[in-house]
Image: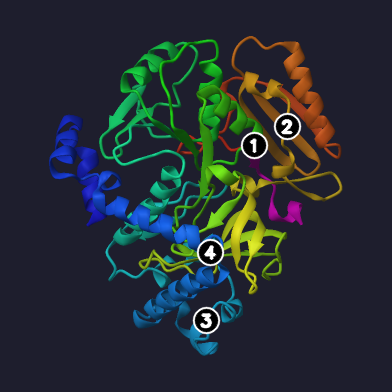
């Protein structure tokens, strides 16, 4: 049903869509029901973020419900596997079940989908991997948004708040569009540049947003474009989403817009959720109301507190695609864990763009989270993108905002060379046409075409 409503909304004229949203209260994010859930989540968070017993209680309850659901509807993929371990899938027994990944789901989607649960088909973003066809339950859509709203709420967002959004929505030749469902002004980040920034700023000022949301690369770009301009706008907070970002990027955007920037971790499959709060930036609190998150090493074992590994999730909310122990392709460090090794909070979350690893001339696997530069020269570039097609060699594509100062280029080049000593690096000054964008307009920091054989 929700999928059908989405299609109808997208095809009707914008004035009609706006009228329907306002007249019939079709915006869930502005509904009293959604906000009562947000406040309930806030009360739970204040307890489970500190109370391990309560945290584990929520995990066990969620795990029990999803396993009972899987068994009652007889999800084909899990039926014999759960039976072989006698259905013992509490937090500890869960380790007996072999993790799955996106390729497992891609090859046998119908073995996971529960068609008796109302839902709709969609795809994952496909930045560092091929897009994956998935199914989302109507209920999971609402439960997911309640958690997202909570993360915004903790950083200043409120019911019916006006939002400025910088995401990869295809607006064609238009520079902006108003979306009544989310009471947001969408900016066309594909067209945002020095030539039209004045017109975009005027529209932003007329809209007078109170909160910001979108890709870190787009907010960094806007920050640079408006430097030296006076802009009549006061944001209460900004939420980064969908891309990795550095603390230098966060600092630049915070200083530009005089507000706090936070982020949350989630993914299209609706299997796990973790979020920062303004008081503890850099720490992502895991929500046991959404799903179970494990962090596994390369052998599939849970890493201890302080350990680094792959984020693996079991959904509690998406009953039409009940993924259990799903390897996301994302990586993180366990900041705080329960006595059974279940993360309560994470740090150093890195996304799946090119798996976020490069390989040096000695075959060492280097995480791109370690390639953070601190030179403010980087903000004189619209885009910085690493490419690797041969172990030990890297190409760095640099798109400057305007006439490039030789000093900025040399400063940035020097810092990259210092951090990547075991690589041969080529630096290429280029234009936007040579940058690889995802279908949704994201700019991956790393584009890797290495084969699995070259990585091993």
Lower sequence index among marks 4 and 1: 1
Q: Which residue appears at 42% of the width and 72% of the height?
A: 111
Lower sequence index among marks 2 and 4: 4
Lower sequence index among marks 1 and 3: 3
Above or below residue 58? Residue 403 is above
Q: Tell me, for residue 246, which label it has, or none.
A: 1
Residue 377 position in % (x across, y down): 70, 20
Tell us which disc is closer to us: 4 or 1: 1
Q: Residue furthest left?
A: 23
Q: Which residue is identified by label 4?
A: 313
Are discs 1 and 2 less than 8 Å apart at CB? yes
| Distance from Cα at disc 2 to Cα at disc 4 | 31 Å
Asked if the magenta segment contains residue 451, the reply would be yes
Q: Which residue is identified by label 3?
A: 89
Q: Which residue is identified by label 2?
A: 373
Question: Which range of residues does the magenta coloring cover?
Answer: 446-456
Lower sequence index among marks 1 and 2: 1
Above or below residue 431? Residue 384 is below
């Amino acid at each position: 049903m929700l999928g059908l409503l989405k299609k109808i909304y997208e095809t009707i004229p914008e004035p009609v869509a706006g009228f329907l949203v306002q007249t019939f209260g079709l915006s869930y994010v502005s509904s009293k029901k959604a906000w009562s859930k947000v406040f309930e989540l806030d009360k739970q968070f204040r307890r489970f973020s500190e109370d391990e017993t309560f945290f584990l209680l929520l995990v066990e309850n969620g795990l029990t419900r999803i396993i009972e659901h899987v068994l009652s509807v007889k999800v084909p993929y899990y039926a014999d596997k759960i039976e072989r371990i006698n259905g013992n899938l509490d937090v500890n027994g869960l380790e007996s079940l072999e993790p799955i990944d996106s390729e497992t789901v891609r090859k046998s989607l119908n073995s996971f989908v529960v068609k008796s649960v109302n839902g709709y088909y969609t795809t994952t973003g496909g930045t560092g991997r091929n897009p994956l066809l998935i199914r989302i339950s109507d209920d999971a859509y609402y439960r997911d948004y309640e958690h997202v709203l909570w993360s915004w709420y903790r950083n200043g967002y409120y019911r019916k708040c006006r939002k400025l959004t910088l995401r990869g929505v295809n607006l064609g030749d238009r520079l902006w569009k108003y979306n009544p469902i989310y009471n947001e002004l969408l900016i066309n980040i594909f067209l945002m540049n020095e030539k039209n920034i004045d017109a975009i700023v005027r529209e932003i000022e007329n809209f007078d947003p109170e909160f910001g949301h979108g890709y870190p690369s787009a907010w960094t770009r806007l920050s640079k474009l408006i430097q030296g301009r006076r802009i009549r706008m006061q944001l209460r907070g900004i939420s980064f989403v969908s891309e990795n970002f550095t603390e230098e990027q966060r600092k630049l955007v915070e200083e530009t817009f005089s507000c706090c920037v936070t982020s949350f971790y989630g993914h299209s499959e609706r299997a796990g959720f973790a979020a920062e709060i303004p008081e503890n930036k850099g720490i992502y609190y895991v929500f046991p109301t959404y799903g179970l998150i494990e962090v596994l090493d390369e052998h599939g074992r849970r890493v201890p507190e302080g350990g680094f590994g792959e984020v693996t999730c079991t959904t509690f909310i998406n009953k039409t695609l009940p993924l259990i122990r799903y390897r996301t392709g994302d990586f993180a460090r366990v900041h705080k864990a329960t006595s059974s090794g279940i993360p309560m909070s994470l740090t150093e979350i890195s996304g799946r763009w090119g798996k976020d690893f490069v390989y040096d001339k000695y075959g060492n696997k280097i995480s791109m989270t370690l390639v953070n530069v601190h030179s403010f020269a980087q903000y004189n570039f619209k885009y910085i993108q690493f490419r690797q097609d041969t172990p030990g060699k890297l190409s760095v594509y640099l798109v400057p905002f305007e006439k490039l100062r030789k000093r900025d280029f040399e400063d940035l080049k020097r810092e990259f060379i210092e951090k990547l000593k075991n690589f041969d690096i080529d630096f290429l000054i280029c234009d936007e046409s040579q940058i690889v964008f995802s279908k949704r307009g994201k700019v991956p920091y790393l584009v890797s075409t290495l084969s699995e054989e070259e990585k091993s």
